[in-house]
Image: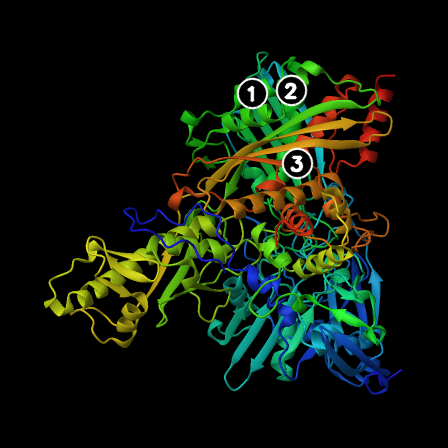
Amino acid sequence: MTALQPAPARTEATALPIGISVPRKEDERLLRGDGRFTDDVQPAHLLEMAVARCPYPHARIVSIDTSAAEQVDGVRQILVGADVLARTEPLTVLRPVPGAPKLPYYALAQEVAAHEGQPVVSVVATSRHIAEDAIELIEISYEPLPHVTDTLAALEPDAPVIHPGELASNLLVANPEGAGDPVVRLAEADVVVTDRFHVNRVTGLPMEPRAVVAQWRPGARELTVHSSTQVPHLMRKQLAEVLRIDESSIRVSASDVGGGFGLKLGIYPEDVLAALHAMTLRRPVKWVEDRMEHFRATTHAREAVHDFTIGATADGRITAMTNTYATDLGAWNSGFGSAQLSSVVFTGPYRVTDGYVERRVTVTNKTPIGAYRGYGQPEVNFPIERLVDRLARRLGMDPLELRERNMLRSDELPWKAVSGAVYDSGDYVRCLHMAAEAVDYAGLRRAGRGPRPDGRLVGVGLSSFVERTGYASARFLARRGSQFGAHESVTLRANRSGGVDLYTGVSSIGQSSETAFAQVVCGVLGIGYPAVRVHAGDTLGSPLNTGAFASRTMIAAAGALRDASLAFREKTLRIAAFRLSDGGSAGPVDPADLDVVDGEVVHRTDPRRRLRLSEVFSIAILGQGLPPEEEPGLEVTAHFEPPDAAYSFGTAAAVVAVDPDTGDYDIERFVMVHDAGTAVNPKIVEGQVRGGLVQGFGAALGEELRYDPDSGQLVNGSMMDYFAPTAADVPPIELLHTEVPSPVTTFGVRGVGEVGTIPPGAAVANAICDALADLGVELTRLPLTPESVWQAIRNARTARG
Amino acid sequence: MTGFGATEPEVDLTTTVNGEEVDARVPARLHAADFLRHRLGLTGTHVGCEQGVCGMCTVLVDGQAVKSCLMLAAQLHGRDVRTVESLATGDDLNPLQRAFTEEHGLQCGFCTPGFLMTATALAERGVPVAREEIREEIAGVLCRCTGYEGIVRAIEGHLNGGAA
């Protein structure tokens, strides 16, 4: 670990080292192969679990015969639906769908399984091999039931109702929101553009599959769960609810998590099953998801159909936006359910006062949908930004000019959008101009669309966005029934080596929070970076918190880290002042004259008076030599809830060359201009934006989970068939940042974890449609495969005769 | 059909792993990645798909980067195996590892051993590799966090001697 330069005496407590790209705390162990992922935990006497899953999209379970499997040497226990019903509650939900009935969902299917891959039987044996051998011997008799996998078909009157006990149709609930009078505004509009947009079903595909190791000590009533989770404390709450035991009996530990992206939010059936086996067998039980299971049993994402409409005056003022969309829930309500943010930001960065949005949550016989990086924001950016371009063409305006005309100005912020979202601050137009300049938008316009000598046509496309990061307070969450808060919490504890132990419930999923947290503590406290040790993701020692999702960790944690560090610093200086004054005999020392510089407390004007932190911390821990009235110990816990969400923003610009005969295209340039407010660590910010962009390109350009409508089977559910981008598939990406501090967060930070997923689809689609504007091609479906572009060209040519 | 556990066929093997000779008796169907991880405790080699696609399990066998989920442990007999645990010396990361941290070539770190071993094999070939070729050469390992830029920069710098 490279040490920071020792800080000189500072006048500003927060001057260092926020804003510096220090080396990551996480790197050394991960580079040495010394991370501790869940499958690396191997307790003695370990048993392993395997799960038999429903092969049908919808089926009644007629009978289960486990007798042959029970005879296999090494098999220790087999559980079926009835066992789970007797011993557990249905899986609980962290973010319920507002206004929707509950869909009781047990860890093993009861009479009916509602998607391919739903767990039906679990087996524990002395090895995974043997558990899987045993599953081959289990006879499960199914009666296939009528199924529906298409989102819109599921809403048709003749569709089979998937949960007839709870619902009259497959519409779980409709959530409308809006303001003003969009119906009247649309009727008055000079121009109205409208279309239906299909957003593909994809998966986040973290490189580490899900995994759990559960151990139970009956005498101690202690369940220890190692899990690959983004939310250890929330998982603890859910396990207590489902297993009917007290939270005090449960410890959840997530050491290193190999990517989450929203898929590892809360418990899954296998977590409950591993715990149940471990508690009844009194032996540790491990389950590691294999990749075939992952494609069928870990939440999918994004799938939605948006009917979007924009009205405008003839001179290009947008007067109304409406968006009615069906979001695919899959068969059950997962921990976070289908995306909710498409409604929050459906008016984008534009000055829209009259709007209406309706979210129609739709049940289908597919793997449940859950949170995934962006959580509705990439989905809605595609229709908004595609229609803005179409509106520009209808009006005979340039898309850049139309955006500029309707974009909110800095002095109009804060702005309450029609969804109720309050955009805090920013300079949206500057980002738009920076993106346009970076790709030489004016030059491209002058040069025209071609064709080039090779026959290809050239187009440029823009996508502008605002992104909600963090949460708009616990009150906002309470109105939606969310089972978590908006705050973060940290504990700082001194140790006798002169270091500070930082305890957080935020697990390390790749977001670099160990590094960024330590930076804030160093900045406020003045201690050296290597002296801060972060203990992350274990409920045993960390204060109750919320977790790593919604680009919210730093937004909330920065305040908790600052508050804890300030209190810690003050006490450190009081103790040091007392010691340096030798109980008064060496002349009084005012704590305000002292500073912490790396490993020492130093007097600002008399630097000969100094004390090592190890000495100060020892005084506190021993309670020997404290000032009168001072409590022994040096440990601070702070909780912090930001007053509102921070909205990040930006514009992306894509330049493409399209072959109008084949539909094949190259992304020749892609510029992303983005504002994440104050960057605690610029290198980490860049890494987050780039990583999000490449996931965004994957979803926009190629990834799609396809179901066969007749059989209801997932047809490409393996790594061989699902094309996540490799290093060779990434288009050139140029990043530009602005840095407008948010007024609603500590230090002015905004979230940065998800933003990259938002603009690729619309920017690239707009560029392709720009290149093909003379043909009148309008792309309305993701992903943008060359085949789909070719089909759109063909359709446009046919339509024009 | 009963008694799988009792009749599980086993094989003996002798192999060299990170410079040390290893003798083992293993189930015939045990794949090499599980052998390294759970029999030898070398958990730096990860498993992501067991189909030879994701590259998390990449190790060096006789100097070649291979996907150890596609090999049986028995096939390591008589071979020389190197894993990510062989790269650092004592407390010192090797130049390739240092290049990864300097270029922010890792986030969650699950794929990192796969990239490090792939790049180690590439470096040992001793021929210069251009940036676009690096992208092709490492396309057998997937990363969902970084967008690959930091990884490519780190490997490029290392191959060109810049990050030593």
Which mark is drawn over residue A760? 3
CB atoms of marks 2 and 1 within 8 Å: yes
On screen, residue A56 versus residue A560, left or right, reads right
On screen, residue A543 versus residue A772, left or right, reads left
On screen, residue A469 versus residue A663, left or right, reads left
Mark in the foreground, 3 or 1: 3
Residue A674 x %, y %: 54, 35
Q: What secondary structure is marked by label 1?
A: strand
Residue located 72% across and 16% down the image: A448
Which mark is drawn over residue A58? none
Task: Determine the chain carrying the residue at label 2.
Answer: A
For disc 1, the marked residue is A318
Q: Check disc 2: other Cα within 10 Å, few if <14, some if 14-19, many if 20+.
A: many
* Distance between the alpha carbons at the discs numbered 3 and 2: 20 Å
Task: Determine the chain carrying the residue at label 3.
Answer: A
* Distance between the alpha carbons at the discs numbered 2 and 1: 9 Å
Q: Is residue B42 above or below residue A477?
A: below
Q: Amino acid at mark 3?
A: Pro
